[in-house]
Amino acid sequence: MDAQTLALAERIAAAYQNGRPLQIKGGGSKSFLGNPMPSSMLESIDCKSHVGVVDYRKDELMIRVKAGTKLAEVESLLAENGQRLPFEPPQFSGSATIGGMIAAGLSGPARPYLGSVRDYVLGVAFIDGRGISYEMGGQVMKNVAGYDVSRLLVGSLGEMGVICDVSLKVLPADEVSVTYSWTASAKAAVADFQRLRKEGLPLSGSAWVDGQVYIRLGGSRLTIAHAGKLVPGEKLADAEGTQFWLDLKNQQLPVFQGDGALWRVSVEPDSEALLSSAQVIEWGGGVRWLKNPASNPRQVQDPSAVTLFRPDQESIVPVMEIPYQHLSGAVLALNQNLKRTFDPGAILNPGRLLAMVSEQ
C-alpha cells in the first residue's frame, strides 16, 4: 500500500471510530446522481489526487489505473494505441474520473451490443468504511465463486467503499464506424431496431431522437461495406456521426437541456410502453428517456426499472420523497446487507444509493 492510500485508510478509520460521515468526491461530473446528501454535515474525502496509470499491457488488453485519473486521459491513451473502453462511459464533463465511472456504473450507446462497465472490470482495490483495504479480482478475466465484490462496487455510488484503483479489460478500436439516419416515428424506430438486430448486423449504437433514427455500425472495413447495404437512410459524415454519439452519451443534445426532471426507464426492447412520451429511445429500444413528464413514471411502469436520473431542482415535491432508484424486497435486503458488511458505521456517502426514506 502506498503512502497516499495508507493516509486515506487512516482517515476513514478515524471517521469510523468517531461516527463521522464522509462524502467521497472525485471530479464531480456525476454529483447529480443518487439521492441528495446533507453535504454541509459531511466531511469530504477528495480522491482527485490519486492519479496515474499503474500498469498497461496492450498485448493483454488490460489497463490498471488509479481512481482519480481523468477518464478522458485514459481514453486518449487507449486511442493512441488503437484500443478503447467498449462500454463507452459518459463523462458529462472533462473532470470525470475512473473511480467515478465505476461508482456510477453508467454505460453509453454500445451497451446492448458490447456489454456494460461491470463486464469489463477485472479487479478493484478499495478501502471500506472501517478503513480496511482490499484488493479484489485480478488482471485477467476469470470465473469466481460467491460474490464478485469488484463488480458489486460498480454502480454503488461510493456506499460500499472508497475506490483506489481499477483493472479493466479493453478492446481494439473498430477499424471503421459508420452512422446512418432516417426519419421515423417512435413505434417504427423500435421495430427497425429489432429488425436490424435480427439480421445480425455489426451494430454498435441505436437511438431515436426527435423523430430521427440513428444507427451505428462498427467493425472491419469489409464487414461494414457489406452491412451498410442493408441499412436504410442517409450515411452521415464521419465527424457528424461521431459528434452525435458523443452528445448522446454525455447528454449534450438539446432534448436533455433545460429545467425539469429527467427519468430513465428500462423496458423490453420491443415494448410499446411510453412511446408517446419518450423524447429519446436508445439501447435498441431498451431504454426510454423522459424529460419532465406529467406524472411519476413509477406509477405506470415497474418501479424497479425506473431511475430518477436528474431531479427537478425547482419541484415543489422534496427530492428525497422521490428516490433515485426504487429498491425493495430481496434486492433492497441484499444492498442493505452489503452496506452493513463493508460500511457498518454507515459513514460513506450516507443515503446516496439507499434512500433514507421509503418511496410513496
Image (cartoon, rainbow, N blue to C red):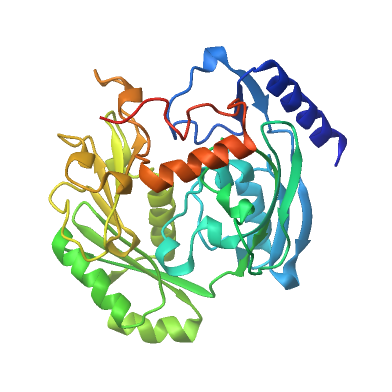
Q: Quadrant of residue 112 in the image?
A: bottom left
Residue 329 position, x and y percent, is 37, 44
Along the viewing direction, whichever of 84 and 197 lies nearer the viewer:
197
Q: How many marks?
A: 0
Residue 359 position, x and y percent, is 30, 31
Q: Is residue 213 left or right of residue 200?
A: left
Q: Is residue 15 visible?
A: yes
- The residue lying at 30 percent from left, 59 percent from top is 286
Q: Is residue 91 visible?
A: no
Residue 242 position, x and y percent, is 44, 59
Q: Is residue 208 left or right of residue 65?
A: left
- The residue lying at 34 percent from left, 66 percent from top is 236
Placement of 175 over or under 356, stated as above or below: below
Q: Quadrant of residue 40 in the image?
A: top right
Q: Quadrant of residue 284 in the image?
A: bottom left
Q: Residue furthest top?
A: 40
Residue 71 position, x and y percent, is 61, 47
